Image: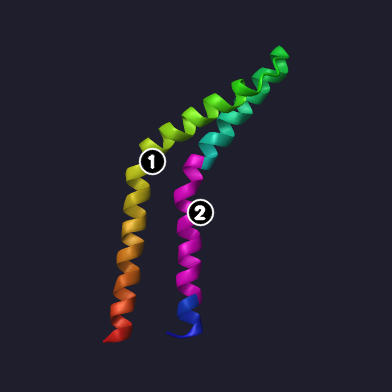
Amino acid sequence: MNETEVLEVTREAILLLIKITAPVLLMGMVIGLIISIFQTVTSIQESTLAHVPKLLVVFLSLIFFGPYMLRELTVFTHTLFDRIVALGG
């Protein structure tokens, strides 16, 4: 395996990481923005009001996007194992 192949696998891994974490992070950011706007408008500065809904949304999005994330990781792992087998034989 030369440098180009190693860099290609690394690039694919980083892109996969971005692809599988983006939905959960975006959901957390959107709900955080909505709660921040609500807190600003109503002048409520309760910290649990910000953290509890974000935690719930992140957990629900992990449940919802979990199969997609697992499928993408499985495909990447199979591709990586195929590359390892190709190197050995």
Instruction: Provide the residue designation for mark 2.
Output: 18
Image position of 7 with respect to 28: above or below: below
Quarter-of-image position of residue 39: top right
For residue 31, which quarter of the picture? top right
The answer to whether residue 11 is magenta is yes
Please name the residue shown 48% across and 56% down the image. 17
Structural distance between the alpha carbons of marks 1 and 2:
14 Å
Task: Give the quarter of the figure containing the C terminus.
Answer: bottom left
Q: Which mark is residue 65?
A: 1
Report the predominant secondary structure element of the magenta stretch.
helix
Number of callouts = 2
Relative to 77, 51 lies left or right = right
Q: Residue shown at 47%/42% (left/top)?
A: 23
| Image x and y of residue 3, in percent | 51, 83
Q: Residue furthest left?
A: 89
* Label 2: few (<14), some (14–19) or many (≥20) C-alpha neighbours in 10 Å: few
- Under mark 2, the amino acid is Ile
Q: Which element is circle 2 on?
A: helix
What's the magenta region?
7-24
15 drawn magenta: yes
At 45% from the left and 79% from the top, the residue drawn is 5
